[in-house]
Amino acid sequence: MEQICVVTTVVDARRVADVLAATAVAGRLAACAQVGGPVDSTYWWESAIQTTAEWWVRFKTTPDRVDALVDQLRAGHPYEVPEILVSREDSGNPDYTAWVREHTRP
């Protein structure tokens, strides 16, 4: 079974999430991107516990496009230390895997 990758990040503004999503899909680094939120995140930052409303973005891509997508996200991300997580998934639907592959080719 062929793998796809799900790359996830969070940002503090919906408009930023939308830009990251649109840029990745337009550049064929992701076949699709889903924006959700807001979600409250609680975390350590600058020696204190912070709570912030954030929006998450989930990108669907192929293993060979992950590095370029992560590089683009790091370059365009507003956070000093952005959360960018990569999960490799076995696709349960071969048609979906084929669709992701087709739409991540330049």
Image (tube, helix red, strand yellow):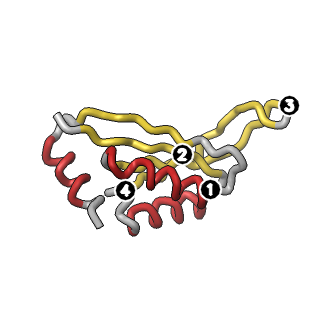
For the residues labelled 2 and 4, the Cα–Cα distance comes to 13 Å
- Identity, as a three-letter code, of the amino acid under mark 4: Ala
Mark 2 or mark 1, earlier in chain = 2
Choose between 80 and 13: the one closer to the eye: 80
Using the image, determine if residue 35 lies above or below residue 51.
Answer: below
Mark 1, Cα crowd under 10 Å, few <14 / some 14-19 / many 20+, is some
Residue 30's disc number: 4
Label 1, on which residue? 77
- Identity, as a three-letter code, of the amino acid under mark 1: His
- Identity, as a three-letter code, of the amino acid under mark 2: Thr
At x 35% / y 42%, what residue is drawn? Answer: 5
- At mark 4, the secondary structure is loop
Asked if the residues shown at circle 2 and circle 4 are in contact, with their CB atoms under 8 angstroms apart, the answer is: no
User: Residue 63, position in %: x, y?
Assistant: 33, 44
User: Residue 18, position in %: x, y?
Assistant: 51, 62
Asked if the residues shown at circle 3 and circle 2 are in contact, with their CB atoms under 8 angstroms apart, the answer is: no
- At mark 1, the secondary structure is loop
Residue 9's disc number: 2
For the residues labelled 3 and 4, the Cα–Cα distance comes to 35 Å
For the residues labelled 4 and 1, the Cα–Cα distance comes to 16 Å
- Identity, as a three-letter code, of the amino acid under mark 3: Ser
- At mark 2, the secondary structure is strand
* 75 left or right, relative to 30: right
Mark 3 or mark 2, earlier in chain = 2
For the residues labelled 2 and 1, the Cα–Cα distance comes to 9 Å
Residue 47's disc number: 3
Mark 3, Cα crowd under 10 Å, few <14 / some 14-19 / many 20+, is few
At x 20% / y 47%, what residue is drawn? Answer: 96
- Which residue is the extreme one toward the left? 95
Mark 3 or mark 4, earlier in chain = 4
